[in-house]
Image (cartoon, rainbow, N blue to C red):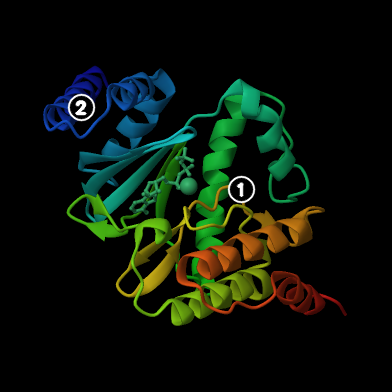
Amino acid sequence: MSDRLEELEKRIEKLLERERSRRKVRDEDYFKVRQLAFDSRTVRALIKLFNKGVLDDLTWIVSAGKESLVLAGKGPAGELAVKIYRIYTTNFGKYLEYIIGDHRFPIVRDKDKIIPIWARKEFRNLKRLREVGVRVPRPVDVVGNVLVMEFIGSDGIPAPLLKDANLNDPVSYLDEILGQVKRSYVDADLVHGDLSEYNIMIWDDFPWIIDVSQAVVTAHPRSFSLLVRDLERVTSFFKKRYRIDVPDPYKLADELARTKEV
Ligand SMILES: Nc1ncnc2c1ncn2[C@@H]1O[C@H](COP(=O)(O)OP(=O)(O)OP(=O)(O)O)[C@@H](O)[C@H]1O
Ligand SMILES: [Mg+2]
């Protein structure tokens, strides 16, 4: 274990130094990554993933956000995205709200326990969405606060987000996204809950939906309002950016909700 630990620390250190020397990482991100990568829970989870043979290497820092750190890696399954969650105490209420009401998860009030549940929630949501054919990254494994999934992009460079992409045929992309929202709702019983141009990647001529940790089951008391908000954000993005006609989000949400009525 201690050999592994040293090896992992070296690997992360190398990754940080290399990225820093390329000036790809802002100081602020550098410290975020360091802090999280050397947090003992995270280190334990990463070592487990190396020992299980899921992960062979960490190659790149993809994103250092408020709530998660995403690294690129490699393993027998090919290029991987390694998402490491951290949850601030101040945000705790928000997380609870999405877990309470979802019968799949126990209700916990302990901050240390909620992080792994959150990671597992994203893993299960990804699995469920893929099973019904929604285009999301294939989930590979989850250990503690670390989720491993298929990498969307290549050579450690993530595909562009919808907000940064330049679409030639926005009408068909919007159609495709709305079709995925419908499939999620009708076939997987899930509402994304944070869908926007920030959580959709454009790759291989298709939209890919990411960041599904907060997705809730349709039986969740807030599922309808979250569905309306998801549809509103997506349609208004396309309307503003591409000036195309878009369907009415409320009507769409209503139509979907009706499919659940008996
Ligand atoms: N499977 C993936 N393949 C490639 N890149 C990914 C993948 N998943 C996430 N990313 C990249 O990492 C970024 C952050 O991921 P995600 O949206 O899942 O996390 P987040 O919780 O929103 O993070 P934040 O703390 O920034 O809000 C994405 O914008 C995307 O660029
Ligand atoms: Mg996101």
Amino acid on which the number 1 mark rests in the picture = Gln
Q: Is residue 33 visible?
A: yes
Q: Which mark is residue 146?
A: none
- Residue at mark 1: C-beta within 8 A of ligand 1: no
What is the C-alpha distance between the residues marked 1 and 2?
A: 29 Å
Amino acid on which the number 2 mark rests in the picture = Leu
Residue 243: give x, y in percent of width and height.
50, 73
Q: Which mark is residue 16?
A: 2
Q: Which mark is residue 214?
A: 1
The residue at the point 47 percent across, 80 percent down is: 171
Looking at the picture, does residue 82 appear above or below residue 238?
A: above
Looking at the picture, does residue 14 appear above or below residue 227?
A: above
Secondary structure of the residue carrying tag 1 is loop
Residue 59: give x, y in percent of width and height.
19, 41
The residue at the point 52 percent across, 72 percent down is: 177
The residue at the point 49 percent across, 51 percent down is: 211
